[in-house]
Image (cartoon, rainbow, N blue to C red):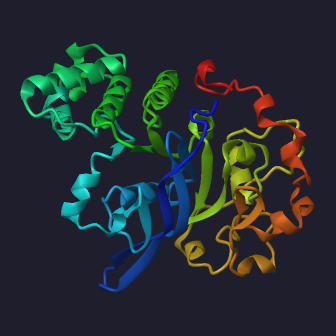
Amino acid sequence: MPDRVTETEGLLVVEGLTKDFETKDARLRKRVTRAVDDVTFTVDRGRTFAIVGESGSGKSTVGRVLLGLHPPTAGKAVLDGRDILGLRPREFRSIRRRIQMVFQDPLAAFDPRASVRHSLRPFALLGGATDRQSQDAVIDAAAGAVGLDVELLDRFPSKVSGGQLQRLSIARALIVQPDVVFLDEPTSALDVSIRGQVVNLLLERQMRDGVAYLLVAHDLRVVYAMAHRVAVMYLGQVVEIASRDALYADARHPYTRGLMDAADLEPDEIERTSVRLSGELTDADAARPGCRLVGRCPFAEERCNIPQPLVEVSLGHQVRCWKSIEEPRSMGIPDHAASSVPWSDVPNDFLPSRAMEE
């Protein structure tokens, strides 16, 4: 995947983002769960920043806080020099045009009682089309831009296929010409046969319009096809963050390696010890002061129970695991894994479309 811009510029800078949820049990005792814990990253103009992890890792919560759907507990998100998390609801309305969202389930993203055109009309209005005639023109053009016949616009969502609805979701998000689009598992509810079409469409629109994407996904193949930079989250924390190529060629954290092994994405030319994670995410693990993967990690030892900071192992590549940095061979990591086989040399037959290869 070639670079889409020659120079990067931080469009959305997220620093120390934290989100706690408070619940009560049957005895009305308060319980606080930290879903996002001190997360920091930057989304560059015209680029895709991806967040991956299992369900419950906190990745979707990050996007929902940035969209104003949940108030943050701490941290800031600076969009072109303005902290959008500190805005009051009325002030945040001015940001709505600049940050849009494509939902995971395209059918649930549309009002089942109204036509697709009716659901797109408020977005055309937000984009500046003030009368019905101009709104219809904008909506028709948006449908055509994602390769759909305008006849579909007058149907109810239940009469439109999942793939077509997701294309319409993308069209709806892009009508207002946003700076950033939050993609919440945009292909997971789709058939395998049409996932590649949706990914290609997103890439084409990014190349044409220069829009930035914040992609949340668990499908590492889709992430490889779309992302420039990737953060791996586990129980609210970022455990590894790097450029796409560095992460896929030289994954360091046991959790990242476990995800890649499960998806069968590790190149055969790199000889690493296979990492099989046991057990599941638990609330008790989320409260650990040290590494939260201890209960599932095959390499865990006593030192892992103390706090683990993110440490830079190479330019732009950070890992939250002392052992992968100080004793990589004990974890089956070659000293120079990244240089032994460039990921661009590995066949990309897992990609949804050959058009997305390097």
Seen from the viewer's position, the closer of residues 184 and 100 is: 100
Drawn side of residue 49 relative to residue 147, left or right? right
Name the quadrant of the C terminus: top right
> Is 221 placed above or below 180 here?
above
> Is 295 placed above or below 251 here?
below
Drawn side of residue 277 relative to residue 26, left or right? right
Drawn side of residue 315 relative to residue 136, left or right? right
Seen from the viewer's position, the closer of residues 34 and 319 is: 319
The percent coordinates of residue 279 (x first, y second) are: 65, 61
Residue positioned 49% across, 56% down in the render: 59
- Residue 185 shows in the view: no
Name the quadrant of the N terminus: top right
Identify the image quadrant of residue 181: top left
> Is 211 placed above or below 140 here?
below
Residue positioned 90% across, 41% down in the render: 340
Drawn side of residue 337 relative to residue 150, left or right? right
Residue positioned 75% across, 67% down in the render: 321
How many numbered marks have been drawn onto this rendered protein structure?
Answer: 0
The percent coordinates of residue 238 (x first, y second) are: 60, 63
The percent coordinates of residue 104 (x first, y second) are: 39, 41
The percent coordinates of residue 28 (x first, y second) are: 29, 84
Residue positioned 71% across, 26% down in the render: 348
- Residue 103 shows in the view: yes
